[in-house]
Image: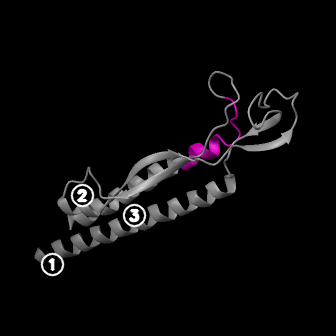
Amino acid sequence: MFGSLDISASGMIAQRMRMDVLSANIANANTVLNESGQVDPYRRRIPLMAPGNPSAGSAQGRSFGVHLAEVALDQAPPAVREFDPSSPLAYTSGPFKGYVAATNINTTFEQINAMEAMRAYEANLAAAEATKQMAQAALRLLA
């Protein structure tokens, strides 16, 4: 019974971490300068999940849970908006020279992913609540 709670908890933790990554993508959708003030558009982060939960308390939870394996950078090229070599946000060299820099983040896509993460979190929460109710019913039968 506690293994199923571990599984649901790992799913909720993974979806919360996924939501953190998606929120960072949305928050940085218009960030084109790095911390040094150089033109370096923010690159979309992609949360990658993997089976198993290394931090689970039971063997079943460790083998059947889920965890955030890594946060990868999207390899898609940065977007370019318009040709304006006089803009301070324009690339000064390379294949995009003279084009105004932009990130490779589609906020609509990120919001859809965030809604999916929220629904997955809610599904794991419902599964944990059902497990809790079954445990309470079993304890009432024993009493």
What mark, if any, has residue 141 been given in the picture? 1
In the displayed structure, does residue 14 sit left or right of residue 61?
A: right
Which one is nearer the viewer's eye here, 93 or 142?
93
Q: CA distance from mark 2 to mark 1?
A: 30 Å
Mark 2 or 1: the one toward you: 2
At label 3, counting other C-alpha atoms closer than 10 Å, the crowd grade (few under 14, some 14-19, many 20 or more) is some
Residue 24 in magenta?
yes
Q: Earlier in the sequence, mark 2 or mark 1?
A: 2
The alpha-carbon separation of the residues under discs 1 and 3 comes to: 25 Å
Residue sticking out furthest to the front: 95
Residue 89: x and y, percent? 78, 30
Amino acid bearing label 2: Arg
- Figure check: 118 above or below 29: below
Q: Which residue is mark 3?
A: 125
Amino acid tagged 3: Leu
Which residue type does callout 1 highlight?
Leu
Residue drawn at x 85%, y 42% is 82
Q: With 140 as the anchor, is 75 left or right in this view?
A: right
Boundaries of the magenta span: 22-33
